Image (cartoon, helix red, strand yellow):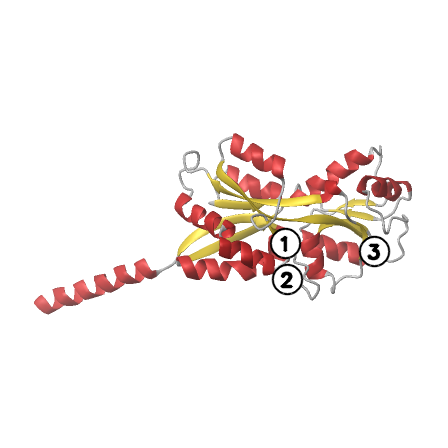
Amino acid sequence: MFKRFALLFLVLTMLVASAACQPKVVRLATTTSTYDSGLLDYLLPVFEKDNNVKVEVLAKGTGEAIALGERGDVDVILVHARSAEDEFVADGHGVNRRDVMYNDFVLLGPATDPAGIVGGNDAAAALQKVAAANASFVSRGDNSGTHKKELALWIAAGVETRGTGYKEAGLGMGDALNMANETQSYVLADRATYLAWKDKVDLQVAVEGDERMFNSYGVIAVNPDTHKGANYELAMKFVEFMTSENGQQMIGEFGKDQCGQALFIPSYQGGK
């Protein structure tokens, strides 16, 4: 009898020890650009190993990523639409928003440049020409941060119609680039995804350098007071990693080419 109890005790001890060693899960909702660019594949293994956690990634457009946070379906969000981020916090869904990194948007197009916009630095003026030429244009059409920026640029352009070539894709950044490539269309993209995909598509940078195309990313923990299921402790570990000296250095080194150009610029090392 004693041996049976001893064996049972040993088995239970092993099960408890095994459960304690299993990594906990932190749920991250993020924009497709951090996924399509390869940034998360680069960063997350380090974070997971250092903290004995597993990150469950839901890569969506920024609008949908924020909606997941509003429903309490995730623990932390990493997105790029500052006004929507501020609203998320103001409405009590998120806490401790921090800047993480930035880059810019670029307007891409085919080598034939039917709208005659290559070399410009005024996105609104370029879109006026795209609309006037009825040139093919692929819109993300998914309420993402990129889509929100595109819509703001169309408003700045002041055109009543975007032309017969305008298509709403309802796709993530990588898929939208593929569609634009297949149809030889203009498309707005974040620079990181474009640089990561430029060898896969036959599109060139047509317009860049417009200050209205600045693209910043923020990380926000879901508010545990509003959403009781949110794992605030793990969310803050992720926030702290992304804004730590090591995390920022890794972001700055990611994808850096021979000319020293990185896909993202860390916010806490000379950033805005």
Query: Is tag 2's residue or tag 3's residue first in the polypeptide sequence?
Result: 3
Mark 3 and mark 1: Cα distance apart in space: 26 Å
How crowded pointer 1 is (Cα within 10 Å; few <14, some 14-19, many 20+) is rated as many
Q: Which numbered circle lies on residue 264?
A: 1
Q: Position of residue 200 (x, y in %)?
A: 74, 64
* Circles 1 and 2: CB atoms closer than 8 Å: yes
Q: Is residue 177 left or right of residue 111?
A: left
Q: Residue at x 42, y 53 (%)?
A: 25
**In the image, what residue type sits under mark 3?**
Gln
* Circles 2 and 3: CB atoms closer than 8 Å: no
Q: Could you say whether the residue bearing mark 1 is in a helix, strand or loop? A: loop
Q: Could you say whether the residue bearing mark 2 is in a helix, strand or loop? A: loop
**In the image, what residue type sits under mark 1?**
Phe
Residue that mark 3 sits on: 184
The C terminus sits in image quarter: top right
Query: Is tag 3's residue or tag 1's residue first in the polypeptide sequence?
Result: 3
**Which sits in the foreground, 196 or 104?**
104
Q: Is residue 143 left or right of residue 97?
A: right
Q: Could you say whether the residue bearing mark 3 is in a helix, strand or loop? A: loop
Mark 2 and mark 3: Cα distance apart in space: 26 Å
Q: Position of residue 6 (x, y in %)?
A: 13, 66
Q: Residue at x 81, y 50 (%)?
A: 186
Query: Is tag 1's residue or tag 2's residue first in the polypeptide sequence?
Result: 2
Q: Is residue 27 above or below residue 15?
A: above
Q: Residue furthest bottom?
A: 3
Q: Position of residue 175 (x, y in %)?
A: 70, 55
Q: Is residue 34 left or right of residue 139?
A: left
Q: Residue furthest left?
A: 1
